[in-house]
Amino acid sequence: MATCTPPLPLNRTFSEHLGRGLTLAQATAASRQAAEGVKSAESVVQLARRHGVEMPITEVVVNVLHGRITTIQAAAQLMERAPKAERYAPDIP
């Protein structure tokens, strides 16, 4: 929250560029660097899938980053997701 609220931090600036429809490359160039997590997001999703952990927000973020869906489609996908109880997966070390 602290890195997204003030108007100047990289995470907020980068995210606003994506939200306005810039591509990952354009947002990175406009921000002068990628926000934290951009490079690792795809690996996080792959690791979660390998361990059977659902990460719908991260999956949508990765799809937006790579231009597979728009931010409007991302919001719709998350809002259309059926509600369910979230739980800690104790079988993951």
Image (cartoon, helix red, strand yellow):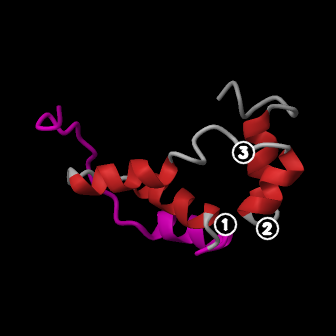
Magenta stretch encompasses residue 56: no
Earlier residue among tags 3 and 1: 3
Dot 2: element:
loop
Q: Nearer the viewer, mark 2 or mark 1?
A: 2
What's the amino acid at mark 1? Thr
Left or right of residue 86, residue 7 in this image: right
Q: Nearer the viewer, mark 3 or mark 1?
A: 3
Q: Nearer the viewer, mark 2 or mark 3?
A: 3
Residue 38 in view in this figure: yes
Dominant SS in magenta: loop
User: For mark 1, what is the residue?
Assistant: 71
In the rendered image of this protein, does residue 17 appear above or below residue 82? Answer: above
- Residues under labels 2 and 3: Cα distance? 15 Å
Q: Quadrant of the N terminus?
A: top right
Q: In the image, what residue occupies the spot 66% across and 72% down? A: 70
Q: Residues within 10 Å of mark 3 (few under 14, many from 20)?
A: some
What's the amino acid at mark 2? Gly
Residue 19 in view in this figure: no
Q: Which mark is residue 34?
A: 3
Q: Quadrant of the C terminus?
A: top left
Q: In the image, what residue occupies the spot 18% across and 39% down? A: 89
Toward which corner of the image does residue 5 lie, by quadrant?
top right
Q: Which residues are magenta?
A: 68-93
- Which residue, as the protein is rendered here, is positioned at the far left? 91
Q: In the image, what residue occupies the spot 72% across and 38% down? A: 11
User: For mark 2, what is the residue?
Assistant: 21
Dot 1: element:
helix
Q: In the image, what residue occupies the spot 88% across and 51% down? A: 30
Magenta stretch encompasses residue 76: yes
